[in-house]
Amino acid sequence: IMHCRPFFLLLFSVLPAIPSSEPMFQSVTETVLPPDNQHNPTQLNYGMAVTDVDGDGDLEVVVAGYNGPNLVLKYDRGQQRLVNIAVDDRSSPFYALRDPLGNAIGVTACDVDGDGREEIYFLNTNNAYSGRATYSDKLFKFRNGRFEDLLGDDINVRRGVANRMAGRSVACVDRKGTGRYAVYVANYASGNVGPHALIEMDEAASDLANGIIALSDVAAQAGVNKYTGGRGVVVGPILSQSSSDVFCDNENGPNFLFRNNGDGTFTDMAQQAGVEDRNQHGRGVALADFNADGKTDIVYGNWNGQHRLYLQDNNQRFRDIASGSFSSPSPVRTVIAADFDNDQELDIFFNNIAYRGHAPNRLFRVARRTGADPQIEELNVGEAAEPQGRGTGATVTDFDGDGQLDLLVAHGESASQPISVFKVTQGSSNHWLGALMRIIDGGSGYLCEMEPVAHFGLGKDEVTVVEVYWPDGRSVARPLQPGDMNSVMEIGYPKEGEESVLTPDTQCGEGFFVKSGRCADNNECKQQSGPPVCPKSRPVCINTYGHYNCGPRKTCSRGHKEGWRGLMICLVLSSLVPSPFTYQQYPLVTTLRLTLDGTHSLLPSD
């Protein structure tokens, strides 16, 4: 059991992999989860989340049922199939999770009270599209031998904390780095009714020894109580080094990118970061480092609009690199970023809803390239295309422990359909590594949450070092042995004074070296001895994360002078800029001022 989830984990290794056009997914629904009334009923379902529901160390899939009960799917190794353990039996410890009257749409799981076991939050809409709903959300805790709704406790009823708004996605955020998570609720406002909510435990008013957990909505205090058409939400160290930031892609309004200020409050940086996208209508969203530069990037789908793949630069701004095929509009719901075939390259799965004719699901590979943006290639999604599927949610988890992620897709809204289950058909011989922790997000896709495992496809590589970082800034570094490959590692939150460091002789892999007990990027461009790393034909060296690029020397046009070597920028000569300077007079020059040898010059806008 983990005390606190880290939000990113680093592996250091080498070698590329080979793409394939063979079908990626094969349906195993008929053998693993055949449709029936108990385990896979034909009903309207929405979000999915992966967590350890029964406390046995294995992970279950929680499904939000809309016109039927919520489901809890557990893999039975004896039967080699998924079974619903939230049965219609009041003596079952999971009975309350069914909650068939809730019209659940979003679901997430996290440790709200810090006891080491995750609570489960269901966002219930009760048929409301926006504004107020008539049925409250539920936050279930395992207590007294069964799951009970904390929001229904007398203390929380008196505090009026239960969310009775029509929302969409929910996610978990450790805003203060304490190991106790708040639930971020992306409500869909109607005018000034239904702001985003942030529900967490009030430690001062709670009595954990006696099972009393007082809850509060701290959205206003944290600065996230915004009114908008809330859709997708994802949590991770997007702009912060290790603290939890929040990204929301919204409908009928700009997106939010809430940067954690370090004290539990947030500042919206979406406009400055270039990710407002105010004319689109967001849905599924995920976080990943798509170009291996050590920065968190954002991918999301817009409803029947241009899909986005935003890469983050060194100035915390984002640039959309989505290709024509990738960005092609579709009725998208969930978006998942994962390495399905363990080839070291991330795949992006778009789950669409066929509400007006065929709308097949799609799969893309984002392949890293040295000195260039990643190459985006559409793959053969195989039987997971489901051109007539009414997709509403999806998640990934390795439920059978074979080292490859399995894909589950929920359906509903416009038609009742059972859940589909897919196995990957490629990459079975590739290495992999997992770590039992929530990585990057505590809720993603759309209405969903992925498994709390950091799954890394390694191709034919062997990893030398693993580093884990928690939202409070603590970290663990551990050398790995060949025998650690193809396994799940459980790395515990370090207690005070237990943070481990690497020895100076640890092999971090090409492009990295040990610095202050951690693997750090080796700046090849600043070599103190030896010949230049770049050839004379391309002499300008630009350091990247784990590598470097070589480029031609930039020649500045007349009236400009070269900036710092290696940055390849040209600066307007101060003698050409009269004083006083106004932007209106010189529209081709930005208002960014730089100091060069004591004089002020200006950076050209082009």
Image (spheres, rainbow, N blue to C red):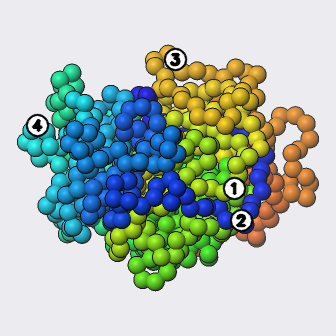
Q: Amino acid at mark 1?
A: Gln
Residue 538: percent from left, percent from top: 86, 57
Quadrant location of residue 256? Answer: bottom left
Residue 241 visible in image: no
For marks 4 and 3, give the one nearer the viewer: 4
In this picture, residue 262 sits left or right of residue 556: left
Residue at 56%, 66% in the rendered image: 384
The residue shown at (16%, 63%) is: 132
Question: How many residues crowd around disc 2 within 10 Å: few (fewer than 14), some, or many (20 or more)?
Answer: few
Which residue does the numbered mark 2 point to in the structure image? 22
State the mark number for residue 155: 4
Q: Which mark is residue 498?
A: 3
Residue 163 image position (x, y, % from top left): 19, 52
| Mark earlier in primary sequence (2, 4) | 2
Dot in front, 1 or 3: 1
Q: Are marks 1 and 2 in contact (CB under 8 Å)?
A: yes
SS under mark 4: helix
Q: Nearer the viewer, mark 2 or mark 3?
A: 2
